[in-house]
Image (cartoon, helix red, strand yellow):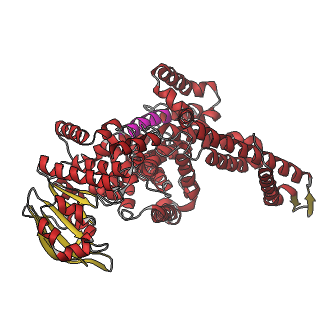
Amino acid sequence: MLELQNIQAGYGNVQALPDISLTIQKGEIITLIGANGAGKSTTLMAISGIVPCRSGKILLQGKEIQGLAPDRIVAMGVCQVPEGRHIFADLTVQENLDLGSFLRTDKAGIRQDLEYVYSLFPFLAERRHQSGGTLSGGEQQMLAMSRALMARPRLLLLDEPSMGLAPLMIKQIFAIIKAINQEHNTTIFLVEQNAHQALHIADRGYVIENGRIVLTDSAEKLLTNPEVQKAYLGI
Amino acid sequence: MMMTVKEIKKSLLVSLWFVFLTFPIMVIKVNPIERTVTWRWSNVLYVAVGSFVISLLAKAWLVRKARAAGRQQAACQARASILQELLHRPGYRYPLIIMFSGLALAFPHLFSTYQANIMTTALMYIVLGLGLNIVVGVAGLLDLGYVAFYAIGAYSYALLNLNFHLGFWAALPIGGLLAALFGLLLGFPVLRLRGDYLAIVTLGFGEIIRLVLENWNAFSKGPSGISNIPRPGFFGLEMSLDHAMIYMYYLMIGLVLLTVFVVNRLQHSRLGRAWLALREDEIACQAMGIDKTRIKLTAFALGAFWAGLVGVIFAAKTTFVNPASFTFLESAIILAIVVLGGMGSIVGVICSALILTLLPEYLRALSEYRMLAFGAILVAMMIFKPEGLIAAVRRTYRFHERKSVAALQDDE
């Protein structure tokens, strides 16, 4: 579904990603784990075109998408939930969701998806006329995910969905990520610091260090890998 | 009302400070011809007492407001948007609209042509305010050079008429479109800028247009300007000056209605939603697939378009244009209209445009203190209604926070 070949990206003089290659199969949950500043978010930003790639190729179902404008990439079915949620605080819940389906024109499908996210998160339906900024952190994360789902993505990029949330809320969010993956066969690329939770729902994982992939394996094997346990799982 | 000693002390300091500030203009009177200096010490007393009382009253008002806000937020909010409320209630809506439109239509017949003339200017500022409201209020792009588009509209009519004898009605759309084109031109280089940097660049753009008009004599006749611009025709009818003024008035009423209609539709369209989203969060916009470039450029172009139209009308109304009419002060006033009206609120912009343009006229009674009073009113408005006269009503509800925490704990 998605293939990154020797991607280089960065900001100004800082080369955040010297060389990244990874592949994602259709229907998988892939997680990218790593420490602060390892290049996790930059990898996502590079895929969605918000940070330009300096060299290398990104193939989405065989088509090169590096260098395309972010809105073109969204139109091709790749939608990102940015780190720190970035919901539209002054707009209502409903308007936030409407903006998720900004590029779509199939009204019936949009309504169907709206019902789907409302069934996933019933509190959103109750508070549809409330401004997004009045929701709690966990609710905002769910709104951000719902907003991305409204684009009906084939590939959903999640950047640190557990950031700043209570442990129970994190559990709930991860259960929902799994549900989205299974019910809609949505491929999910999950970037997380909470490696433990992420590896529990993922099929495969990549470990990133200083902008390079240092390890990749199935999620179960990574969970039992002594190096990963020591560095990221705190065991 | 609780008035602690501390607050009275503060007010005393305020009044002392005001005495000091106003000392040169209120107390010392220099007569350069007779070379005498008069010291009007009695004024010190007036200023001191006046500022002391006003400061105390303002403090009392703020205390009361804070208390009311603490007590019942919901009630306070409902009161804040009473006009909006009236407009949305069907029982009041139509009588109100009929009353306003009746007043608007009868205005030139009820009052003198002079009054109608002032009102025409006010209507022009309404359209300018609504245009800038798209850029600043809705899309959140601070534009300090808006007057440039106004100038482009005015000069496009003046020059097209001078060189090609184009009439008003032909020049009107051309002026608007030219301004929109320049809006795009300004938009391209500032796409990556936000906030302060954007403000500086747009400020520079406004000055560049004015300086070009002032110095390129061969093109724009420089500071002496272009005169004898014809007023708009009405099917070739010859009109007296009075009638022409009244005609301009109705023309502006029509343009205001058109602007309100279009801007209202725009704000509630997909594009308007995207503008709001852009104002809120650029990264989220990109993640949602909103084309940042196109959205920003359309905001600049559509905002500039209205300024261009009003520019053409301005040229036709005064029959004379020169660069002195398009200084930064104009931009600042239009921006003040948007900010005071409440960013993004159409009714608010209309109200504040009327206030900001009519107030200086009716304050003429205060002669030389006119601008002082005007400034004081602006400061007072910003202190007491910082969100604008009529804040844009977004359909939001206050959230009962205590309840939500309880609900969350239930979930967990």
> Which quarter of the figure has residue A61?
bottom left
User: Residue B217 location in percent, x, y?
Assistant: 50, 64
Q: At x 25% / y 75%, what residue is drawn?
A: A231
Residue A42 visible in rendering: yes
Disc tally is 0
**Magenta part mainly helix, strand or loop?**
helix
Q: At x 24% / y 46%, what residue is drawn?
A: A101
- Magenta highlight on residue A127: no
Q: Is residue B373 left or right of residue A120?
A: right
Q: Is residue B386 left or right of residue B152?
A: right
Q: Is residue A77 left or right of residue B211?
A: left
Quadrant placement of the N terminus of chain B: top right
> Which quarter of the figure has residue B172?
top left
User: Residue B340 location in percent, x, y?
Assistant: 56, 46
Q: Is residue B225 left or right of residue A32?
A: right
**Magenta-tinted stretch:** B252-265
Q: Nearer the viewer, residue A187 or A48?
A: A187
Q: Is residue A199 above or below residue B149?
A: below
User: Residue B381 location in percent, x, y?
Assistant: 63, 45
Residue B165 visible in rendering: no
- Magenta highlight on residue B264: yes
Q: At x 17% / y 49%, what residue is drawn?
A: A180
